Image (cartoon, rainbow, N blue to C red):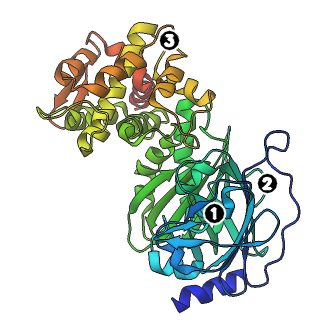
Amino acid sequence: MARSVALLATLLLGCAGAPERSRVGEAGSAPRARYEATGTGTGDLEVVVRATGGFDEVALEPGAEAYVSDLRVADAEGRPAAYALGGSVYRVPACSGPCTIRYRIALGSVAEWFDDPELAAVVGGAVFSPPTTWLLHPEGRPEGRFELDVKLPPNVAHVSGLHEPSTHHFAAELADLPQAPYAAFGDLRRRTIELRSGKIDLAIAGDTPALGDEAIEGWVRAAATNVEGYLGRFPIDRAAIFVIVGSGGAIGHATALGNGGASILARVGADTPARALDDDWIMTHEIVHLAMPGLHARHNWMEEGLATYLEPLARARRGVISAEDVWSEWYFDMRQGLPASTDGGLDGTESWGRTYWGGAVFWLLAELEIRKAAGPRRSLRDCLRSVVDAGGNISVRWSAKRFVDACDAALPAPVLGPLYERHAHEAVPVDLDALFAELGVRRSQVGVELDDSAPSADVRRAITGVERQVASSTERATSDR
């Protein structure tokens, strides 16, 4: 614990006030809460909350309340007001109306206790902790916006996945705070990746990779370009991607988190070779998640299934993998998503196979249905671009109906809606052998072979969009010899 407190004391010593910044939404409704978090010379954060009401029951990430001190409440007239702590919830009657809450949180100690960068952890010289952990937020799903100013010394980096209208000034909905995007501050090796239609704030922490930070940046840029190329645009204006470099020689677990912004947290071994970065699918999978709004947990199969389906397509369209690679993976792995005799619909499934591969089967069926109903010039890409154009991305929460309606808006007639209604509520048998045979995907001794004489071979070629290009390259190589 002493190590983390000393670290934060070093990072935050000498903190000065931040200059005044333009406020988000000045022309619209005022935020229901304004937060100001200031670093101290002791490694703590001092937080001030100015709320207009609805803060009578507030909480941090459960467990973090043990590290809160000097909590003071003032009512609308500035008079001291009482509060009570029950479990992890603070009950503050005065804050049913306008009030001010001040407190100090020992974030270094919180990080030492949680030791989990998704909640709070010390990584090298950086502290990972999303505002969920250290900002008192109303219980439930309150309406209204909040704004947050983070004040740190100029030499201390701070990166957050929250919407950032101006430097160190963030804004989102109060309902986002119970699970806000990832964030970190301290010794972060920052890089900005400019894309054609968006940007990524990349923050690297921990060990220095054997290949250098440039290799990490190239890995993230390539994955973002995969998704941008498929959709025709990056799904959000700005995303924060955090890469923790530790021991080992492989790419580890990664997760995407939205709710008021966009963020990805990934882990990479310092000795990861260039080939592993070049062949990786994980970062592309996570960036696909940025292109879909957050749905209710029972629709998790839609989100994970889409990322599982689109990831190889996005890589194939850039020539990273071949069409044979895509169809081979689908031919063998999609069978894990077929319903067992005891399975119901996909909504609410807790099965790994049904969530990832059952979801991917659904999206392949959607692709085929769209092309059949809307003609060869339409595809799932049109459907998904319509969602992104309507503001549907990981920063917002939508209902499943709103999502499928936005997708179908790009088509002459609804396709996704009826397909969803069927697969969500009942176990639908899918004859994958017949489907793949129709597309011209046949098992071979080393994987699959693609048959251009199959009835729907043209559809198969259109889905991957790379077979003709690969064939042309092969023909040129043959002629050169």
Residue 308 in sight: no
Above or below residue 387? Residue 104 is below
Residue at disc 1, secondary structure: helix
Q: CA distance from mark 3 to mark 2?
A: 41 Å
The residue labelled by disc 3 is: 377
Residue at the left extreme of this rendering: 341
Residue identified by numbered label 2: 166
Residue at position x 37%, y 14% from top? Answer: 369
Query: Which class describes the residues within 10 Å of circle 3: few (<14), some (14-19), or many (20+)?
Result: few
User: Tag 3: residue type?
Assistant: Arg
Residue drawn 63% across the image and 44% down it: 143
Residue in front for this viewpoint, 64 or 333 = 64
Q: Nearer the viewer, mark 3 or mark 2?
A: 2
**Left or right of 61 on screen, residue 194:** right
470 lies above or below 127: above
* For marks 3 and 2 on the same chain, the one whose residue lies earlier in the sequence: 2
Q: Residue visible at 54% across and 39% down?
A: 397
Q: Quick one: SS at disc 2?
A: loop
Mark 1: amino acid:
Pro
- Residue at image position (54%, 56%) is 139
| Disc number placed over residue 317 in the picture, else none | none
Q: Position of residue 476 (x, y in %)?
A: 44, 27
Q: Gap between marks 3 and 1, in whole Å?
A: 60 Å
Disc 1: which residue: 93
Q: Position of residue 417 (x, y in %)?
A: 41, 19
Residue 96 position within the rendered picture, expressed as x and y whole percent measured from the top left: 66, 56
